[in-house]
Amino acid sequence: MELNNVDIKSRPININCLQWSEENHISVISPSGIDIFIPLYKSKYTRNAVVTCQDSSDRNPIKINDFNSTLIKDIPEVFKCLTWSPIGCSIIQSCLFIAITSRFHVAIYGPKDGPLQRDWIEVENMSPRLFQHYTEQTSENDADETLSDKLQSISVSWSPLCFPESFDPFSVIAVGSKAGTITLWSYKNGLDHILTMQPHVSWVITSSWSRWLDLGQDQYASSFVTASDDGSVYMWRVIISLIPVISSGIENIKIQASVTLHATLSQADNRPASIMKWYECNNTGEKLAIVKGLKIYIWASNGSPLINTDLDPPKMFKIPISRGIIAIIWNYDGSQLYIFNNEGNNLTINVSGTKIDVNESTTKYINDVLATKWQLQYEDNEDEDEYEEFDDESQNDDTLLSEVEPIYFGADGSGNSLFFAVLFALETTDALYITDKYEVSYVTFCPSEEQSNNELIPSLIMKLKDMLEDAYILERKSTNYLMWDLLEYCDLENESDKNDSLLHQMDKACWDCYHKYATSSSISGLTEFSLIGIIMKWKNVLYRNRSINALRLLMHIYSNTMVSINHTKIDSTYICIKYGKYLSKHLEAPLDVQSQRNPAFEDCLKKIENYFLKQVLSTIVDCIKCGIAINNGHDQLFVVYWCDWILLYFNDDNELLKLAKFLYEYLSTLQELSGSFKTEKAWISQLLSSKKSKIINKAPTRASCPACQSNVSFMRGPTGQCTKGHIWGNMAYE
């Protein structure tokens, strides 16, 4: 087995220190900072960024002067907890994260330019907003200690995206304090306070959200679970109401929230809940697992959200005596729960039956793989030590492998829980593993199932089909997150040409979904002009369409299982950096299989382009017919590009030709653009009157690059390139 561990320059000190984002990024929070990794195929990582904790005294108005703060005033500020956002919260379509520091500074961080950017910066400082809110809400009767506790934020959770029918998606952030209060904030490229609640009388140490449920009439509900250090755990029903408001002629929305107690999951028993994990499926309802000490409690609903049911008493499972549970992970279909404890062990339990029992075979498999990983790490450390000089008194040369054991700090699962990322360190059984590696911890990969287990394939395909039924799936999660572990699990060398292989079945499921929903796409015109109406039509037809979602997943599968992509003529590393959806490390299928897949790839590509052009251009035509002028020069230029594209590659599609003709005629009336487009309109008239398409090999040369004004030639594929090398993206693939 190959050693593919990655080192962290310190040891984490908090639970939930490793998290896997919906963009397929892995974060590790430790005293040295926040390390962010991107998993590559064949179970390898690349370190994307390291975010260090900067002193916040100049931008954090929260100053705590209690006894504990006095003790740590000379200790450098460090990150204490972190949570990832859903993927659609940022204008650059990247996941963000919120972090809280040891001096109670709360801030949102994001990549400076794009998802794969190595520079992560503070994009939103929440501390002044929290300070202002609590100080304004404090009455004269409140003691100074009460305000101080409210200002000390110690936990944070970020809800899944909510997808209103008539408004932009948004999410909700919950920040918990030592005073038992929680502030709720809506987030969509900015913060707005919604509500402050008092769910507990003591510290709010963790909270968690379920997926939003559409109640109709612009109302949405979520199960919001909160836990305190006194052991109490409550499930709240949070209802968000969206109210349109018009200010200065601009239509916006006002978000109102109401919170009611749905269920008491645990009374105060001095056993705090440390971890909460949801499992959600369109077909099987919801499951919630909560860790309290060595016990795990599981609530489940059958086919409906927990918030719509009267909760039955939970199932309970107690692990053997341990130093503590550091992570729980649901498997791909919610029938099993993977438990990781601090001693370096995994325990897999079956939870779908009436009783919970241990799955001995899966438990043994995972522990054997992880044991191999940490043993290889120990041997690698010993090999490095042979080439370095150490003080003989400080170096323990007598440490044997049999005396070394791992300790686990954190773990989380990939998109379909087929792989884990596990954070571990090495110690001796009787004393610390004293070498220069002592302060180092390591992240490693571990599969949850053997790749030779073909019995999993029907269940995995069933889950993929369930995801494809969700029109919002690619707004909820990135293609990398959804498909990475499925492709990693494929055995391309031996099974890629077999009809019963996972790769073949994924292809078939996506194409079946495309054909099932392709006929339901609509490009009907606008009946009444409104800016929101245009935006929502755009989003619904381009990004909330099951058939196009299936094609986008197919593009991801094809792009990551072929050595080269002939039509783009662009290095795959560029595609990775530009789009954040394709990986520079590909899984290479055998050449004969690739040659068989190329026609399907080209077919998939053309269908996406065709659909994109029809939807975008029909929307632009609707706007023009409603009296909206295209005044921006860049907008005019890209409309010209799209019309030229139709002439070059889709001159056999009469519907597209009619749209291009209308737009050429409109563009010829604009003074900003030179030329009357007579040649193009004549070509279209000839093509519409002919039964056979005419091959047009020469692209118009009037299009210029917005960056340098040189000529741009758009090829079929995700990009176009000017004569000076500037590259422009095609929105159809975003």
Image: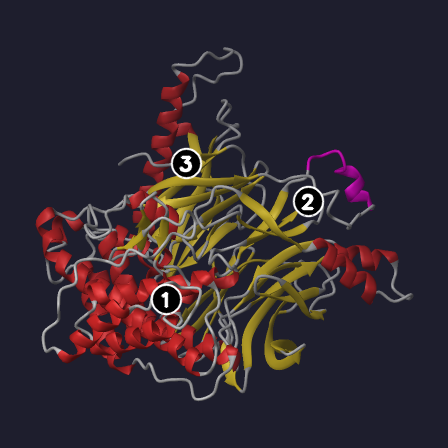
* Viewer-side label of 3, 1: 1
Q: Provide the secondary structure element on which disc 2 rests.
A: loop
Residue in the image at 39% along x and 14% along y: 387
Question: Which quadrant of the figure has residue 133?
Answer: bottom right
Do labels 3 and 1 touch, CB within 8 Å? no
Q: Provide the secondary structure element on which disc 3 rests.
A: strand
The residue furthest bottom is: 527
The residue under label 3 is 6
User: What is the three-letter code of the residue carrying label 2?
Assistant: Ser
Q: Provide the secondary structure element on which disc 1 rests.
A: helix
Distance, label 1 to label 2, CA atoms, is: 52 Å
Residue in the image at 8% along x and 50% along y: 592
Residue 230 in magenta stretch: no
Where's residue 661, x and y in %?
28, 75
**Residue 40 left/right relative to 604:** right
Q: Nearer the viewer, residue 711 or 291?
A: 711
The relative height of residue 368 versus residue 716 in the rendered view (above or below) is: above
Specify start and end residues of the magenta stretch as a single range.
66-76
The residue under label 2 is 102
Q: Which mark is first along the chain, 1 or 3?
A: 3
The reply to whether residue 463 is in sight is no
Which mark identifies residue 639?
1
User: What is the three-letter code of the residue carrying label 3?
Assistant: Val
The reply to whether residue 481 is in sight is yes
